[in-house]
Image: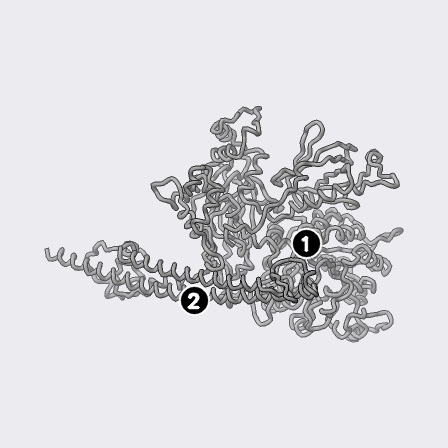
């Protein structure tokens, strides 16, 4: 996308939010209720409230995780507060006035801020509009300049002398107890203060290398050239994404240049360059990939699905606390598959519970978890939610109660029957996320058919009572031939014969997943597209070809399968889904790296969300894209049946262009509130055969955390075989290894150029102050054997001296032969290749070739404009009957047509058809253009080679003549 065209708009702060509203803030612990005025600052950075004594409390908008009203909000338990709010009064309107705001640095450490409005339904508007600001992609992915604006509200680093010097430079009070009048600190003064506190010598160097050496400014032409050369992806199509022109960049100068005179002259100063590189036009990520941009009509098995393991736990697997709140938090974070470990409740209530069996973890009621899921399932994403049941409730009565809770609490959200277009039959694909919008799917063991049960029992030598076993009407009895995940009667017998040590051994890897019990009719009837079975083999699964069955694997079992049968695993995941979960011995709730399982297309790679380690950070960072909907479309090689993909391949992947990524760490800004030395690590996650090296900068020479500078060579990841599966991680550390901040970005979302990388906390929350200034370059991978191929066409008549800067003496000897290399003659100081390329005749050729390319570009642009003009006319053709003209793209009164519904459908179909035709013609035009450019560049390369050869020969003749004359003397 062009940096001159904004992709996303910043969050809108409605006028009533900034004006403020009167609320009562209450706290159960202190039994206090205080009148406050609640506001959001005009830029949407902070939510804050002011008490009557003028004291203020501030809440960073990015720390807000949820807003709740009505019965989902907190209700006072303290009797004193209940009396204040008339909660026990029969006609109480408290639920119409309440507002709860949930904030916290992660999903576990949460704070609940409770408010009550004076008017009804006020809290609802506040809750919706605050969440709209929180969920705006630019709230988390704001530009560096936006974060610098937020710093006004925060403390500066503890380098007191530098802060005082910067304040003095701005003629501001610098005493310890001095206060600064806001009127004396406008934006212009603030910018000056920042430039004095955190000077940017590295940007000054960049500026100097891209403008006239004698002039202290950059013209429009220089800025456009800089943008096109450094800030633009060289792989972009010039027709679809035209390069910046001098007249277009004037708006950037007007936006960032502090000098009015420079603006009038169309000039950018070094300070203006600093603010330009901090602006949203230079965001390190492709903002268009933050919104929902992928095709959501593919089968479910074609997507990676954001998934959680043992969702209810807030800490370790052995003695952690369980909480229904974890279901809310994971779903709000975009997770689409949560796990419920269900166990039988104790008398007298016999309410089913959720806990981690055979451990000291606490219990929560199954009903509370279901209510939490119902409340939060579709708040941040409308795409389907999968409930992965690990069912240990061996009571038909309690299973029936579980099923009833699901039906009554979820209501229409629960998918109880398969869709008509996607019956549960072999060869029929799964429905798409779009088909299942707003639906909850149950993954639970499903009851076996009579015929299957008899067959399995005959193999085991058992008798079966047919009347006990029923098959749901919608399931084809012949199509359930896989071995059940645990055959009920057999399992009960087997568990009865196991001693305690054998049970513990089974649990050590699979946890309690291998100990599930019989699925009774009520729960079984809720299961359709996610039917768990015990995995047999890839061959058996391919033969049965049933998309609606799923197998779960521990990380160890899955790793064994992907190392032995990688291509079969990929094929399996094209057809049906797999779920990976941590091994049972991870009692500290640590996680495995999900990348290896994404590499073979596993959809549900479940992690412990309560642990913010590197795997969780990577998972959260990647699923932030595509609208944070919880679904990411897999590469077509992981979807198409006619394509094969081996993640361990060392060769190129058919039609996939590998990438080369170069990362240069230039500097840091406000990395720590202490004066310390710092360093940066850069790492790539991707396919096993990708460049896997982790790079690290040197420790800064001085203890400077405000603006440290690293002058090091680029870190190059030479070959990234499938960029769509790879991601880049950048982490900053203090000396000694203390974490400062990190950022994980998918390679396909990385923007080339100079960028400020705004760092995130361990829980992926934006950090306001720390950032890294980097230079990133993503380009198509070129093998070493092809590099400099134009030079290899130069005839061998050129002497060794002419290519001393390119070829070593040994390689030259190999080319020319020992005889030539052994000739012992005095070596004149001949011209190098670089000098030959600076000769007037060669530069004249380059100028001529540049004109030819520009002419081709002009003709290509003209053809594109003509094509767009042609379709503009087509879009405006009349389509309404009875002679009433109407634009296809105009949303007028459909009542002017006889059949508005039919007309709307006709309009949609015509628009889609025209768009498809336009896209096809643009692609065809682009291909013709690029073929023409490629042929012309090949011709230019030949001409350049011939000209270099000619100039070298003339130079060589002149040098030999001079040498001869010298020897004759």
State which tag comes first along the sequence, 2 or 1: 1
Asked if one can make out residue 762 in the rendered structure from this viewpoint, the answer is: no
Total numbered badges shown on the rendered structure: 2
Point out which mark residue 313 bears. Answer: none
Q: Classify residue 711 as left or right of residue 16.
A: left
Q: Classify residue 153 as left or right of residue 224.
A: right
Name the residue: 74% across, 41% down: 122
Looking at the rendered structure, the secondary structure element under dot 2 is helix
Residue sitting nearer the eye, 674 or 661: 661
Q: Quadrant of residue 493?
A: bottom right
Name the residue: 72% across, 33% down: 36
736, above or below 391, in the image: above
CA–CA distance in space, label 2 to label 1: 43 Å
Asked if one can make out residue 644 in the rendered structure from this viewpoint, the answer is: yes
Q: Position of residue 278 (x, y in %)?
A: 50, 43
Looking at the rendered structure, the secondary structure element under dot 1 is loop
Label 1 neighbour load within 10 Å: few <14, some 14-19, many 20+: many
Q: Position of residue 613 (x, y in %)?
A: 62, 49
Outermost residue to the front? 883
Q: Quadrant of residue 289?
A: bottom right
Q: Quadrant of residue 423?
A: bottom right
Quadrant housing the C terminus: bottom left
Task: Please state which of the two labelled residues, at mark 2 or mark 1, is closer to the viewer.
Answer: 2
Residue sitting nearer the eye, 62 or 345: 62
What residue is pinned by disc 2?
931
Q: Position of residue 895 (x, y in %)?
A: 70, 60
Q: Classify residue 143 as left or right of residue 264.
A: right
Label 2 neighbour load within 10 Å: few <14, some 14-19, many 20+: few
What residue is pinned by disc 1?
381
Residue sitting nearer the eye, 768 or 517: 768
Q: Position of residue 876 (x, y in %)?
A: 57, 62
């Amino acid at each position: 996308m062009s940096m001159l065209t904004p992709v996303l708009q910043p969050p809108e702060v409605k006028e009533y939010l900034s004006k403020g509203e009167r609320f009562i803030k209450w706290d159960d612990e202190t039994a206090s209720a205080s009148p406050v005025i609640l506001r959001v600052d005009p830029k949407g950075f902070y939510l804050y409230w002011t008490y009557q004594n003028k004291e203020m409390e501030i809440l960073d908008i990015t720390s807000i995780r949820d807003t709740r009203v009505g019965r989902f909000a907190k209700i006072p338990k303290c009797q004193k507060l209940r009396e204040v709010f008339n909660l026990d009064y029969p006609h109480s309107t408290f639920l119409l006035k309440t507002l709860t705001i949930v904030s916290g640095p992660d999903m576990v450490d949460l704070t609940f801020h409770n408010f009550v409005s004076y008017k009804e339904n006020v809290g609802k508007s506040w809750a919706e509009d605050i969440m709209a600001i929180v969920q705006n992609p630019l709230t988390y992915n704001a530009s560096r300049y936006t974060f610098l604006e937020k710093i006004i509200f925060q403390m500066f680093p503890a380098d007191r002398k530098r802060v005082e010097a910067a304040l003095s430079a701005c003629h501001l009070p610098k005493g310890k107890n001095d206060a600064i009048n806001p009127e004396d600190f406008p934006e212009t003064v603030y910018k000056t203060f920042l430039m004095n506190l955190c000077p940017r010598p590295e940007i000054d160097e960049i500026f100097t290398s891209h403008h006239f050496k004698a002039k202290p400014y950059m013209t429009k032409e220089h800025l456009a050239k800089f943008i096109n050369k450094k800030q633009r992806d060289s792989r972009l199509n010039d027709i679809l994404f035209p390069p910046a022109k001098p007249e277009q960049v004037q708006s950037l100068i007007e936006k960032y240049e502090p000098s009015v005179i420079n603006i009038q002259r169309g000039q950018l100063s070094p300070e203006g360059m600093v603010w330009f590189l901090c602006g949203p036009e230079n965001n390190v990520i492709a903002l268009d990939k933050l919104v929902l941009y992928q095709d959501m009509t593919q089968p479910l098995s074609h997507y990676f699905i954001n998934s959680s393991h043992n969702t209810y736990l807030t800490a370790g697997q052995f003695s952690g606390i369980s909480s229904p709140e974890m279901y809310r938090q994971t779903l709000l974070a975009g997770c689409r598959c949560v796990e419920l470990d269900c166990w039988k409740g104790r008398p007298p209530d016999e309410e089913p519970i959720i806990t981690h069996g055979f451990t000291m973890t606490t219990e929560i009621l199954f009903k509370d978890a279901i209510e939490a899921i119902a409340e939060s399932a579709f708040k941040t994403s409308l795409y389907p939610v999968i409930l992965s049941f690990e069912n240990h409730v061996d009571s038909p009565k309690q299973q029936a109660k579980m099923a009833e809770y699901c039906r009554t609490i979820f209501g229409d959200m629960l998918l109880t029957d398969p869709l008509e277009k996607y019956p549960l039959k072999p060869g029929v694909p799964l429905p798409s996320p779009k088909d299942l919008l707003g639906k909850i799917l149950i993954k639970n063991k499903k009851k076996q058919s009579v015929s299957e049960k008899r067959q399995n029992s005959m193999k085991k030598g058992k008798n079966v009572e047919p009347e006990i076993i029923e098959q749901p009407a919608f399931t084809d009895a012949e199509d359930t031939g896989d071995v059940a995940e645990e055959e009920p009667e057999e399992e009960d017998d087997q568990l009865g014969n196991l001693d305690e040590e054998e049970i513990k051994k089974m649990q050590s890897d699979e946890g309690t997943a291998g100990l599930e019990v019989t699925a009774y009719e009520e729960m079984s009837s809720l299961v359709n597209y996610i039917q768990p079975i015990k995995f047999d083999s890839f061959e058996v699964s391919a033969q049965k070809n049933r998309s609606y069955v799923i197998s779960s694997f521990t990380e160890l079992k899955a790793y064994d399968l992907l190392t032995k049968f990688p291509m079969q695993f990929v094929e399996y995941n094209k057809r049906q889904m797999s779920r990976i979960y941590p091994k049972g011995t991870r009692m500290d709730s640590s996680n495995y790296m999900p990348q290896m399982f994404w590499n073979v297309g596993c959809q549900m790679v479940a992690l412990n969300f309560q642990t913010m380690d590197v795997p969780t950070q990577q998972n959260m960072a990647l699923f932030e894209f595509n609208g944070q909907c919880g679904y990411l479309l897999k590469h077509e090689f992981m979807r198409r049946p006619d394509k094969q993909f081996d993640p361990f391949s060392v060769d190129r992947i058919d039609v996939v262009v590998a990438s080369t990524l170069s990362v240069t760490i230039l500097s840091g800004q406000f990395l720590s509130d202490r004066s310390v030395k710092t360093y940066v690590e850069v790492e790539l996650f991707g396919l096993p055969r990708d460049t896997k090296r982790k790079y690290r900068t040197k420790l800064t020479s001085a203890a400077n955390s405000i603006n440290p500078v690293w002058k090091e060579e680029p870190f190059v990841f030479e070959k990234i075989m499938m960029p769509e599966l790879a991601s880049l991680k950048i982490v900053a550390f203090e000396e000694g290894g203390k974490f400062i901040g990190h950022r994980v970005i998918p390679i396909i979302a990385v923007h080339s150029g100079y960028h400020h990388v705004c760092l995130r906390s361990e829980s992926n929350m934006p950090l306001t102050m720390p950032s890294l200034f980097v230079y990133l370059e993503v380009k198509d991978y070129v093998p070493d054997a092809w590099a400099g191929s134009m030079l290899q066409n130069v005839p061998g008549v050129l002497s060794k001296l002419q290519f001393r800067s390119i070829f070593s003496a040994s390689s030259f000897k190999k080319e020319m032969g020992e005889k030539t290399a052994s000739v012992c003659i005095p070596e004149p100081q001949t011209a190098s290749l670089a000098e030959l390329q600076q000769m007037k005749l060669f530069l004249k050729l380059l100028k001529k070739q540049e004109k030819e390319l520009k002419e081709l570009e002009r003709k290509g642009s003209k053809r594109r404009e003509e094509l767009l003009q042609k379709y503009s006319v087509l879009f405006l053709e009349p389509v309404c009957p009875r002679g009433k003209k109407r634009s296809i793209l105009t949303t007028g009164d459909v009542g002017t047509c006889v059949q508005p519904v039919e007309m709307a459908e006709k309009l949609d179909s015509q628009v889609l058809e025209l768009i498809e035709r336009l896209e096809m013609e643009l692609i065809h035009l682009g291909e013709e253009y690029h073929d023409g450019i490629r042929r012309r560049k090949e011709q230019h390369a030949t001409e350049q080679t011939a000209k270099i050869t000619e100039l070298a020969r003339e130079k060589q003749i002149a040098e030999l003549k001079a040498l001869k004359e010298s020897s004759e003397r």
